[in-house]
Amino acid sequence: MTTVVQSAPVAIGEVHLALLLSGPRHGYDIKRAHDAWFPAERPLAFGQVYATLGRLVRDGHAEVVGTHSEGGPERTVYAITGSGRERLLAWLDDPAPPAGTAGEEIIRKTVVALHATTSGADAERVLSAQRAAHLRRMRQLQRRSTSVDPERSTDLAVRLADRHALLHLDADLRWLEEAAEALRAQPPTAPTPPSPPPSPTPDDQEPQP
């Protein structure tokens, strides 16, 4: 049975921007490319795609560059802007919060960095920054666990919570090290090109924004 992971709301805009790096796309193509990048997640809903694109256009991170139909329904085509590139690069360079629930965002950042090589933030640098952030947080927890504070050292709930956080961080750290090793063992990959629009069918119609 496949485990479905919920998309991280904080990153969905940045993922849309990454999908626009290789060239202008319409909403249907963005949805298909997203689902191909993250096959273990719940498929992206068209409503979420267009709502996200609308916010990106509103904020100046994306722009509408035209429409086309090619014999099917008319589709709006979007492109990333210079501001959008800056936002994506800043997100990739900012390590995910090192906490027990940060695993999904770490994976999303790595996947985006691997696919979106033209963003200016290579995957190895993203992994290195995330590893450094995890090590800092682990040292903080380890120092706290050896604190001479008698209340903290005897509080079972505090010690168990800190241990839980440390184990999650350690698991993430081991994954980051394996990912970095795998990355060094293979040649760099090119950005994923936009997919050609499919032939429309009566059962495959998308809602319009």
Image (cartoon, rainbow, N blue to C red):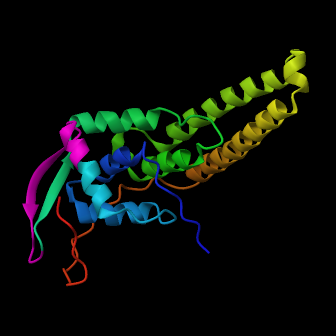
Q: Residue at x 53, y 41 (%)?
A: 124
Q: Residue at x 46, y 64 (%)?
A: 42
Q: Position of residue 43 (x, y in %)?
A: 41, 66
Say whether residue 37 is visible.
Answer: yes
Q: Residue at x 75, y 27 (%)?
A: 141
Q: Is residue 25 above or below residue 88?
A: below
Q: Quadrant of residue 143?
A: top right
Q: Position of residue 110 (x, y in %)?
A: 50, 48
64 magenta-colored: yes
Q: Is residue 102 above or below residue 129?
A: below
Query: In front here: 134 or 166?
Result: 166
186 magenta-colored: no
Q: Position of residue 140 (x, y in %)?
A: 72, 24
| Position of residue 164 in the picture relative to residue 182 (left or right) | right
Looking at the rendered structure, the number of numbered marks drawn on it comes to: 0
Q: Residue at x 83, y 32 (%)?
A: 159
The magenta region covers 54-72
Residue furthest bottom as drawn: 202
Q: Quadrant of residue 151?
A: top right
Q: Quadrant of residue 66?
A: bottom left
Say whether residue 194 is visible.
Answer: no
Q: Position of residue 21 (x, y in %)?
A: 28, 49
Q: Is residue 89 above or below residue 199?
A: above
